[in-house]
Amino acid sequence: MKNIKILNKNFYKPISCLTAYSPSIANILDGNIDLILVGDSLGSTLYGMKNTQGVTMDMMINHGAVVNKVIKKSLKVLDMPYKTYENKKDALKNAKILLNNCKPDLLKLEINKKKLEILKHLVSKKINIISHIGVTPQNYKNFNKIKILGKTNIERNNLLKLAKESERLGAKAILLECITADTAKLITKNISIPTIGIGASKYCDGQVLVFDDLINLSPNNKKPKFVKNYLNFNKIASYAVKKYNREVKLKKFPNLKFTYR
């Protein structure tokens, strides 16, 4: 696998990961980011869903396939959608469909104690898996009910055990979502595979964000605390649209420069 050494703690520099759902965005990210994730966050980002439970295999296949066509340098990661890996048989069948159609380097599964057997089964079939633990969005119909995990000793110990077991069963990396800094630090120090955080502090071995959040594409002002805007694309694009509208109304566009003669 190309660049797999990125996921080796003896080699790695902090790992960067962003989402992409279209060839144009994937082309911008390729080679500038270590991992490109076609995540089921596309449900809310592209389709206006309130959660990720409505994301289908067809959606993941369609977006994963077009993104795959342009990625040449970065590692490709693909989410398995909700209810597609409830048992070993379905998990393997759906994993193979995603692998055959989208050619990802790794699949990401939201893992709890019950899903460890699924993780073990897929790894035994030589499939590269990222274990997503902490807050697992597929379990929430209402994202407003999400709470930070790892505040209590019980939560902290359970997450550490889950991370260690994921490593033992062959996961290539652990994604930690919305957990306390102390818990993220504890897990990162106690496993030998990389941790990639989203809302899980600087103590992880890498970070992931949704690209649309990174550039403030959505006008939604209720973004999670962990989101940092690196560009206000919404503002820039709104200005461009208003300028275009004005020039059309005044018949300044198209002028001779943009006209065939």
Image (cartoon, rainbow, N blue to C red):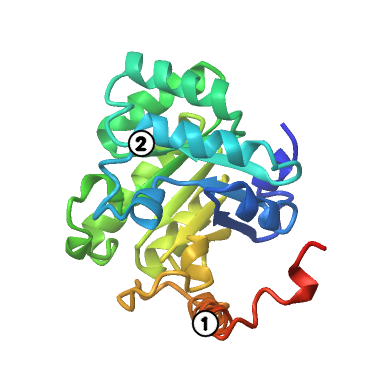
Query: Mark 1 or mark 2, which is nearer the start of the sequence?
Result: 2
Outermost residue, front direction? Answer: 261
The residue that appears at 69% across and 58% down in the rendered structure is 28
Image spot of residue 88 (x, y percent): 34, 17
For residue 155, side relative to residue 26 (left or right): left
Outermost residue, right direction? Answer: 261
Which residue bears the numbered disc 2? 81
Q: Nearer the viewer, residue 252 or 238?
A: 252
Three-letter amino acid code at the position of disc 1: Lys
Q: Nearer the viewer, residue 28 or 163?
A: 28
Judge whether 54 appears above or below 227 on screen. above
Image spot of residue 212 (x, y percent): 48, 64
Which label lies toward us, 2 or 1?
1
Q: Label for residue 180?
A: none
The residue that appears at 45% across and 23% down in the rendered structure is 95
Q: Quadrant of the N terminus?
A: top right
The residue that appears at 34% across and 73% down in the rendered structure is 220
For residue 52, side relative to residue 203 (left or right): left
Secondary structure beneath dot 2 equals loop
Image spot of residue 179 (x, y percent): 35, 63
Q: Nearer the viewer, residue 45 or 80?
A: 45
Judge whether 163 appears above or below 224 on screen. above
Q: How many neighbours does mark 2 have within 10 angstroms: few (below 14), some (14-19), or many (20 or more)? A: many
Q: Quadrant of the C terminus?
A: bottom right
User: Is residue 8 visible from the viewing direction of this image?
Assistant: no
Q: Label for residue 249?
A: 1
Q: CA distance from mark 2 to mark 1?
A: 45 Å
Judge whether 45 appears above or below 221 on screen. above
Image spot of residue 4 (x, y percent): 70, 39
Judge whether 6 appears above or below 68 on screen. below
For residue 17, side relative to residue 46 (left or right): right
